[in-house]
Image (cartoon, rainbow, N blue to C red):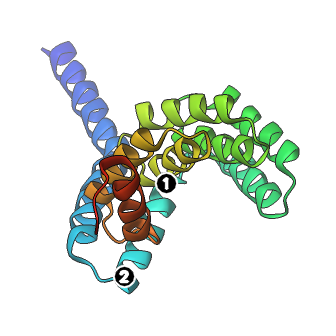
Amino acid sequence: MRNVASYLKCAVAFFAACLVIATPSFAEEAELEALFEGLQTADASAARQIEGRIYEIWSQSKSPSMDLLLSRGREALSEGENKVAIEHFSALIDHAPEFAEGYNGRATAYFHEGRFGQSLEDIRRTLELNPRHFGAMSGLALIFEEIGQTEGALAAWREVERINPNTEGLKESLERLEREVEGRAL
């Protein structure tokens, strides 16, 4: 009987520990759901704030080392040091292959280097890991426009619109591409 009680105590303790560890993830998911719902009705100013919070959540790797690599990659990007950024993001991806922001950052650096094929591959992986990543979808639209794939660009911008209708420049991009692809007079 004593062994059963001991086993049950261990099982309960393990279950409680699992709940504590998993709770932030559930809390983040619930917050993200609320934020994405808020994007649907927010005005432009509120949408910028909501976007910022979404990116904050997406940027949390749960590892200080990985957060440092992300930060260094983003810093290099902001300074126009694309090759250095690629190195930092590649290291991040090597160590945290399930962290979408590493791929998204590297996709941006590849885009700035004109390496569209590699950028597209990293966008694909970003969207595989995070299907609602409106930033990656925007990047996809920009690349499609750059390489003359206007139908693909229009489809990508429409997906961005579905998720984040207040994306800056979205309306103009949609109108321009709709005229070009569908021949509409808007």
Residue 151 sits above or below residue 174 on the image: above
Which residue occupies 36% across, 40% down? 131
Residues under numbered marks 2 and 1 in contact, where contact means CB atoms less than 8 Å apart: no
Q: Is residue 7 above or below residue 153?
A: above
**x and y percentages locating residue 59 in the rendered image:** 54, 54
Earlier residue among tags 2 and 1:
2
Is 48 placed left or right of 184 in the picture? right
Relative to 129, 90 lies left or right: right
Q: Which mark is on residue 44?
A: 2
Q: Estimate the x, y position of residue 163 in percent, counting from the top left.
A: 29, 56
Q: Position of residue 28 (x, y in %)?
A: 34, 55
Check disc 1 and report the residue beneath it: 135
Residue shown at the point (80%, 47%) measured from the top left: 85
The quadrant of the picture occupied by the C terminus is: bottom left
Q: Residues within 10 Å of mark 2 (few under 14, many from 20)?
A: some
Residue type, numbered disc 2: Ala
Going by the image, does 70 lie left or right of 121? right
Residue 153, labelled with which disc?
Answer: none
Q: CA distance from mark 2 to mark 1?
A: 16 Å
Query: Which residue lies at the image location 76% right of the left edge and 50% below the top edge?
Result: 73
Q: Give amino acid for label 1.
A: Gly
In the image, 132 versus 167, the foreground residue is 167
Q: Nearer the viewer, residue 149 or 45?
A: 149
State the quadrant of the N terminus. top left
Instruction: Find numbered disc 1 in the image and state the secondary structure of the residue it sits on.
Output: helix
Label 1, residues with CA under 10 Å away: few <14, some 14-19, many ≥20: some
The outermost residue toward the left is: 1
Mark 2 lies on a secondary structure that is helix
Residue at 78% from the left image edge and 60% from the top image edge: 75
